[in-house]
Image: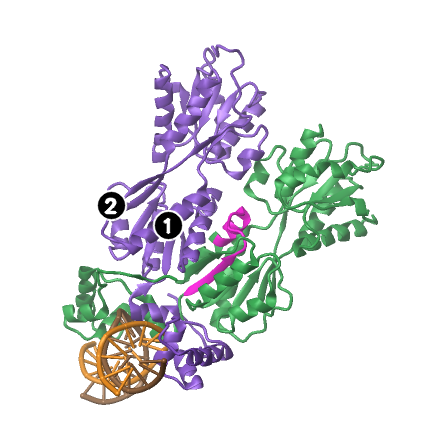
Chain colours: A purple, B green, C orange, D brown
DNA sequence: CTGAAAGCGCTTACAG
DNA sequence: CTGAAAGCGCTTACAG
């Protein structure tokens, strides 16, 4: 449990009322900037406020008014720069709108997620932004989240949940990347990395398949290579691309930037030069993408702006309830850089 | 401002009392796990709690008990992985101890810092963990922070402040790195990167100078090269190391990993091979350090563990006030990897 | 072991 | 324009 007692008693509206010779009600009106109070009275009270170093107790006000001035933000992995940026974006607008962010990090554990949410809900947030852990249980989430506060889910769809959802346009992003490689002349293009059981991976693979199909190319099963979404695992699996020596791919659409950077390392270690002998694209536009050598062609999703967008959507929902839940798709943008080169010989065969 | 009204009225202890035929006091005792209530009564009440989907209103309890169950965490740059890890560590133990984290990100702006703290303090945190923005004004911080909640400052010392302070052992870390290069046989070692007006840079330079002095080497002014603490700026300034062609250094202690990775890029672009022709070390052990080619020798500071440590120190201070403020120095550890090679020829001259 | 009453710091009709 | 009174959801002596 928790609970810490503070010793020096805080100064309250009662102290200010006494000190400036008015009633507590008048002090309250001054605090809330009401036009009802006389300028002289206001000045007197404000001087006393400053003199005693008054600090507003917003929790007490929230209790009385039956309002809330906090937003709960529950993140699956704060140590991932993508989600850290997202959190920064959320905090930006939450703070700007006069709310405060209650943070919870779940570290991809559904159990921690449950515990964190239970704890946060006791603080009566006005709304919840949830970037779910992998394998979250939608049923249990509904139970712990209740119906008091509106919820916005980010990034990972929750099966069966009826909350607002902000999604990245994974399918479109992967399609753009694949089309770009096709335009450069590539014909044998792999999809590299990620776990097929993650919805974002499935969606990106779908976009990749869409683009190939539109170009009249049948994707080969060997062209789909699974890895953990980490640099190390991607580096380790890079040779899987060339397992079938007869028709090796000349390019790869990678699940994300981390995987793409790992693949670059793996290629280099095997004497291949990414951006010269082999073309590849990433997804996310993490800061390192632009600084890699060669710089990584990727799909930008602007996580900080996604955070701002999520917070705006939630605050809007807080203000007007009872709308049907919405699915919002965030824009993506292809950034062409040096890692996506043309194929070695023009026919790519 | 803020404030959002919730429509469906929440279920309260009164509802539970009515529903289970006991008084509100008894419900409260059940909620707080008191041994005073009879097992049958407890069971009856708990069933009703579950039936009505009661959620505890901790704000109301805190108001009545004059306690707090939140900790304010104010971070200078959440998009920096180092601080994101730190935040994750703080949240870990804060949550485990039954508190909740109130997050504020200042983006290195002292003005935002001031506003963020003012807003957070209105929510009556039990304590504050502050990683100050550059050029924070200690006086103004004292005013907005007040004396109600204990404060722990992380990473950047605040001139004149009398709060607890958790510091990285910058001086020792840089000394270890420099000694390591000396042992490899280097004699002309530069200190590369960082701004001399930042206290962490000054401390690291001091450790570097200490080690050189102990080896009987006078550091040359040309061996101190300033850059912004970014990869790009470091890459751009890499040729400054070789400006004095007569006695170029054979190694560099870098301000941090980001700068070291930038320097590697710059060296490579100029035909030098880090880890073969030139030795270098970083500071921080960010995730990329181990994955760089060559892997980067660096000083590990374990930001997540620092976050846990900061939270533990603060909670301890919350429990017992009126101790004199303490300065705690976090351990550092040298991790030797491939980037620190011996000098090209053994005398290094 | 249980209940009636007071109170945490604030706000809000309601009188004046 | 200002004040007295009630109440937000909880807890805590104090009786019984």
Labels 2 and 1 in the same subunit? yes
Measuring from the top left, give residue A43's x and y in whole percent: 46, 78
Mark 2, chain letter? A
**Figure check: B319 above or below A210:** below
Which element type, helix, strand or loop, lies under badge 2?
Answer: loop
Residue assigned mark 1? A312
**Front tag of 2 and 1:** 1
Q: Which mark is residue B86?
A: none
When asked about the image quadrant of residue B98, the answer is bottom left
Measuring from the top left, give residue B179's x and y in whole percent: 73, 47
Residue assigned mark 2? A162
When asked about the image quadrant of residue B298, the answer is top right
Q: Residues in magenta?
A: B70-87
**Figure check: B120 above or below A162:** below
When asked about the image quadrant of residue B131, the answer is bottom right
Q: Nearer the viewer, residue B328 or A124?
A: A124
Q: Residue at x 34, y 35 (%)?
A: A199
Q: Alpha-carbon neighbours of circle 2 within 10 Å: few (<14), some, or many (≥20)?
A: some
Q: Alpha-carbon neighbours of circle 1 within 10 Å: few (<14), some, or many (≥20)?
A: some
Q: Is residue A322 visible?
A: yes
Q: Nearer the viewer, residue A211 or A19?
A: A19
Q: Residue at x 44, y 85 (%)?
A: A19
Q: Is residue B339 visible?
A: no
Q: Residue at x 32, y 55 (%)?
A: A127
- The quarter of the picture where the N terminus of chain A appears is bottom left
Which element type, helix, strand or loop, lies under badge 1?
Answer: helix
For marks 2 and 1 on the same chain, the one whose residue lies earlier in the sequence: 2
B86 drawn magenta: yes
Q: Nearer the viewer, residue A346 or B189?
A: A346
């Amino acid at each position: 449990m928790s609970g810490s007692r503070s010793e020096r008693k805080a100064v309250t509206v009662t102290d200010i009322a006494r000190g400036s010779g008015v009633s507590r009600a008048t002090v309250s009106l001054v605090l809330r900037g009401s036009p009802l109070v006389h300028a002289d009275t206001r000045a007197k009270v404000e001087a006393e406020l400053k003199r005693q170093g008054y600090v507003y107790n917003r929790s007490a006000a929230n209790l009385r008014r039956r309002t809330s001035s906090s937003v709960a933000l529950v993140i699956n992995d704060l140590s991932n720069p993508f989600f850290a940026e997202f959190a920064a974006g959320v905090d930006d607008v939450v703070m700007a709108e006069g709310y405060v962010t209650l943070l919870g990090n779940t570290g991809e554990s559904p159990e921690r997620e449950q515990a964190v949410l239970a704890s946060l809900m006791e603080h009566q947030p006005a709304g919840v932004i949830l970037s779910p852990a992998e394998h979250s249980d939608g049923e249990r989430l509904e139970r712990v989240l209740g119906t008091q506060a509106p919820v916005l889910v980010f990034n990972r769809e929750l099966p069966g949940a009826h909350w607002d959802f902000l999604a990245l346009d994974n399918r479109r992003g992967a399609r753009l990347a694949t089309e770009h490689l096709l335009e450069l002349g590539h014909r044998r293009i792999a999809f590299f990395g990620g776990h097929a059981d993650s919805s974002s991976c499935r969606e990106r693979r779908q976009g990749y398949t869409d683009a190939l199909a539109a170009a009249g190319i049948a994707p080969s099963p060997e062209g789909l290579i699974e890895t953990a979404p980490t640099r190390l695992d991607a580096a380790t699996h890079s040779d899987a691309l060339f397992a079938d020596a007869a028709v090796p791919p000349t390019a790869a659409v990678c699940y994300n930037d981390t995987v793409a950077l790992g693949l670059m390392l793996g290629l280099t270690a095997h004497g291949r030069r990414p951006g010269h002998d082999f073309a590849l694209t990433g997804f996310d536009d993490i800061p390192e993408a632009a600084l890699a050598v060669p710089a990584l062609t990727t799909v930008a999703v602007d996580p900080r702006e996604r955070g701002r967008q999520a917070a705006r959507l939630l605050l809007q929902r807080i203000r007007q309830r009872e709308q049907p839940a919405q699915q919002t798709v965030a824009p993506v943008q292809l950034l062409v850089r040096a890692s996506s080169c043309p194929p070695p010989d023009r026919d790519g065969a």
